[in-house]
Image (tube, coloured by chain):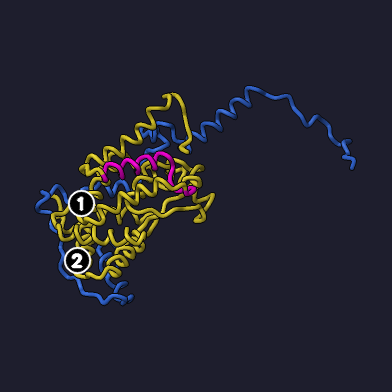
């Protein structure tokens, strides 16, 4: 017999986090709390756990919880201060692209903790994890699409967040800050922003993001091996 | 400056062994390939040394924490939250610790 989901540590934690955000209405407190949770989990290895907490809330039937979390993300979006996770900058990742186990160990030996890194919000983190070489083993399409859909469904619970997040992604894709996004990541984020602004369902937005990456691949001769630049 | 060459018994430059050099280059290229240089087709999950293991973060994201429970029955336990005064940093820390206790 499967254990009750109510006993799952992630479900328990998601409940406590939601409750704290529901019962404390102060914007500063809510954002500080969400950011502190992300940071305490660990901005490097712990950030996927933070994303999992968000999608656990997204998958729940508690609309109050979803509204509270989405409203808190909206505060972060308004202040350009989302809870963020850290991935290595793509230019710094060339020595260990694709994030294999071997490459992760090599990266540690070569750079220790000094490898250049960049901070990303949840959707940006997920997309960079999928599309560019980082310290993590590259994320698979299926889990990416599912998690992205769940994040978007959660964010859609707050009108401000739903308006601001695609705008942020669009603005991100138009900047040329070195070492932040590779072309594949940029294309996917642009596809998400466009589809989201057009009011497409979350499922279709996620499919658009995957298709944006597939377009890049199909235009390249099959026997070519390229660097992801 | 003159470099004394009296003690050099044989030429420092040897004829190139092309077969050995070719084998060495192939070996080096193979090593680089095994480091996971990504192809234009993205990660190849069937390649043995490149992506045999999933990232633990991906495994966690893929996990069904609700154990197949119907969506309408996926209730979060929202009890036990305390009202915190804004700016009370110590209370914020305690709240975060309480929230994350189950994961620790």
Q: Are marks 1 and 2 on the same chain?
A: no
At mark 2, the secondary structure is: helix
Magenta span includes A79 = no
Residue A69 percent location from the top left of the image: 23, 60
* Subunit under mark 2: A
Please state which of residues B4 and A21 is positioned toward the viewer in this rendering.
Answer: A21
Query: Label 2 belongs to which residue?
Result: A22
- Mark 1 lies on residue: B65
| Residue B7 located left or right of residue B83 | right
- Count of marks, rendered view: 2
- Rendered yellow, the chain in question is A
Residue A61, how many percent across, how many down? 13, 54
Q: Mark 1 packing: few (<14 Cα in 10 Å), some, or many (20+)?
A: many
Residue B2: x and y in percent read 90, 40
Identify the residue at image location x=89%, y=36%. B6
Q: Which chain is depicted blue? A: B
Residue at the image position 31 percent from the left and 34 percent from the top: A211
């Amino acid at each position: 017999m499967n254990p009750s989901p109510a006993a799952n540590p992630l479900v328990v934690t998601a409940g406590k986090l939601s409750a704290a955000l529901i019962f404390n209405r102060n914007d500063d407190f809510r954002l500080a709390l969400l950011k502190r949770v992300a940071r305490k989990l660990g901005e490097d290895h712990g950030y996927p756990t933070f994303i999992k907490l968000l999608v656990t809330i997204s998958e729940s039937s508690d609309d109050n919880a979803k509204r509270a979390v989405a409203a808190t993300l909206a505060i972060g979006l308004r202040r350009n201060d989302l809870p963020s996770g850290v991935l290595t900058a793509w230019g710094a990742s060339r020595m260990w692209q694709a994030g294999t186990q071997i490459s992760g160990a090599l990266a540690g030996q070569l750079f220790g903790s000094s490898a250049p890194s960049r901070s990303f919000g949840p959707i940006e983190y997920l997309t960079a994890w999928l599309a560019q070489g980082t310290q993590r083993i590259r994320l698979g399409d299926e889990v990416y699409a599912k998690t992205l859909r769940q994040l978007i469904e959660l964010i859609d619970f707050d009108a401000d967040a739903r308006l601001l997040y695609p705008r942020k992604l669009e603005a991100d894709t138009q900047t040329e800050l070195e070492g932040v996004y590779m072309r594949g990541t940029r294309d996917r984020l642009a596809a998400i922003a466009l589809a989201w602004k057009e009011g497409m369902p979350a499922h279709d937005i996620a499919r658009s993001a995957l298709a944006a990456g597939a377009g890049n691949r199909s235009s390249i001769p099959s026997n070519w091996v390229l660097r992801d630049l | 400056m003159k470099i004394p060459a009296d003690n050099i018994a044989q030429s420092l430059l040897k004829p190139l062994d092309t077969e050995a050099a070719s084998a060495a280059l192939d070996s080096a290229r193979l090593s680089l390939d095994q480091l996971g240089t990504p192809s234009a087709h993205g990660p190849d999950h069937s390649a043995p040394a490149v992506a045999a293991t999933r990232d633990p973060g991906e495994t966690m994201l893929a996990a069904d924490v609700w154990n197949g429970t119907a969506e309408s029955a996926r209730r979060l336990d929202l009890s036990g939250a305390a009202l915190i005064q804004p700016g009370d940093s110590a209370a914020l820390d305690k709240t975060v610790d309480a929230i994350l206790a189950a994961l620790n």
